[in-house]
Every structure is written in structure tokens, then in C-alpha cells.
Image (tube, rainbow, N blue to C red):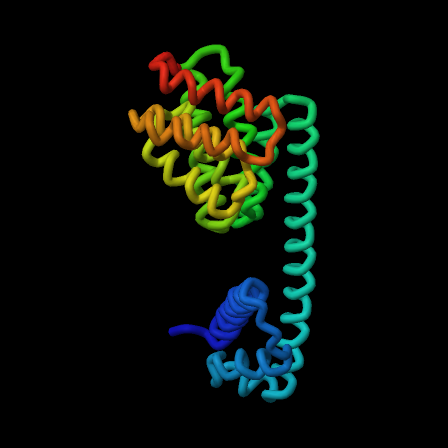
Amino acid sequence: MIREGTSIANTQKVSIFVILIILVSMVFIGCQRPVTRLARDLNQLESPPSYAREKNSEDRIRELEGIIQGFMGILEERIQAAGGLATAYKLLGMEYQRLGMHKLALENLEKAIEVESANEILLYMAGTNAAAWADSAPSPEQAQPYYVKSDRYFTRAIEINPYYGEALFSAAVLKHFQLEEHEEALGLINRTIEIQPGNHRAFFVKARILASLGRLQEAADLYGEIAAMDIPNPQKDEARKNQRAILDGIYE
């Protein structure tokens, strides 16, 4: 046989647990439901027999309101603290990046991503630093996992924001030069050019990708188009040089 006191204690534990679950849900879905209304609903969820003999309904509602307010304060403090922590890790990662300490930058950015997992800028920065560290890794075996990690971060950033031109361009460069996934790189660089038609670097990369795919005439034609663009003369000269190399069969 269950004692009445045990039933009351268990009911209180359940109430607090239910309150916590609902409050967490409210915070993350942006619900502005009045505390009094929530307290009334929770009061109805409780086992009636135990509290009916202990307190009247209005007393219990006031008690629940106090519990809710307490939990709300705790949740708000922790959410604010988490946001501040993410910002601190991001700033630290940016400073390490500025100093060229890319592995430490990546580690701190990954900690920020644990808090803000849908922040495409953080994901892009993490991908950039992963690739930068891989570029200077002591051996190809050590570099490869970081190139793969970089690709994963760029891909996730693009999934969140399909019009993120910098992420598209960086992913295309990575897939072409480091991962040798030329078809995928071509798709990404085409999307980059659609979004950033003035990005002449993207046209150079596209020409290289076309050449790598054996589409030499298309690459030569594109270099000709680049040379006709309104870009600095050194870039024009480079485009003409590459076009001649393709046509002469000496392009590398």
C-alpha cells in the first residue's frame, strides 16, 4: 500500500520535472505563454486526490508560479552564459587564426559550434582553418583527415545557407585541388559564379577544373573570356598565358 505522503512527494517530483521540460521547450521555440496560465495547466496535470486534501487549487497555482519563475531565471542565466561562452570561443578562434595558429583556431571554433551548431559563419571559419592547417601538415597522412573535416564544415555551412558565396568558392577549391573531386567542384564553382558573377577568381578556378576534366577547348575559351574582363592587367596576362598553353598543348 502506498502512503499518502509518498504520493504527495512523488507528485511534487513529477510536477517539477514537467515544469522543467515545458520551460525548456518554451525557451527554444520562443513561446511567450503567461506563467499563470502555465501554472493552471500544470495544476490540472497533477494527481487531484493528494493535493485536494492539502491545499486548495489557487494556493497550488501560486506555488507553481513561484517554481516556474525560479526555473525561468535559471534557464535564462544558463542560456545567456552559453551564448557568452560561444562568443568567447569564437573570438579566441579568430585571434588564433590571425596569428596563423590554425589548429588552435579550429579547436576553439569547434567549441563555439557545439553551442551554435547552425551558425554558418562559424562552420565556414572552422572549414577554413582545418584546410589551412592541413596545407602545412607534416605529412599527407596527417593532412587528409583535416581536408575531409574542412569539406564537411563547408558542406554544412552551404546546407544552412545555399547562397553563401565564400563557402561555395572555398568548397570548390578544396574539392578540386586537395580532394580531386572535379565534377563536384565544377558544380560548386558554377553556383559561386551565379551568386558572385564579379568574382574573377572563380572563373580562373572553373577554367582549371574544366582542363582537369579534359574539356580543354572550353577551358581555353573561358580563359579568353577572362582576359576580356575588366580585371587588373596581371590577371589578364595570366589568362592569356593559360589560354595559349592549352592551345599549344603545354598546359599543366
Q: In the rendered image, which quarter contains the C terminus?
A: top left
Q: Is residue 148 visible?
A: no
Residue 222, x across and y down, in percent: 42, 32
Image coords of residue 73 (percent x, y):
69, 63
Q: Residue at x 33, y 28 (%)?
A: 217
How many marks do you count on the picture?
Answer: 0
Which quarter of the image is occupied by the N terminus?
A: bottom left
Q: What residue is at 35 percent from the left and 25 percent from the top? A: 211
Q: Nearer the viewer, residue 113 or 251?
A: 251
Residue 85's image quarter?
Answer: top right
Q: Is residue 70 visible?
A: yes
Q: Residue at x 44, y 34 (%)?
A: 172
Residue 180 in the figure: left or right of residue 153: left
Relative vertical location of residue 217 with respect to residue 27 in this rendering, above or below = above
Residue 24 spot, x, y in % from top left: 55, 63
Observer-nearest of 41 and 7: 41
Against 119, residue 69 (above or below) is: below
Q: Nearer the viewer, residue 50 or 206?
A: 206
Q: Position of residue 89 (x, y in %)?
A: 65, 38
In depth, the one of 20 and 214 nearer the eye is 214
Residue 66 to residue 181: above or below? below
Residue at the spot 44% in from the left edge and 48% down from the top edge: 159
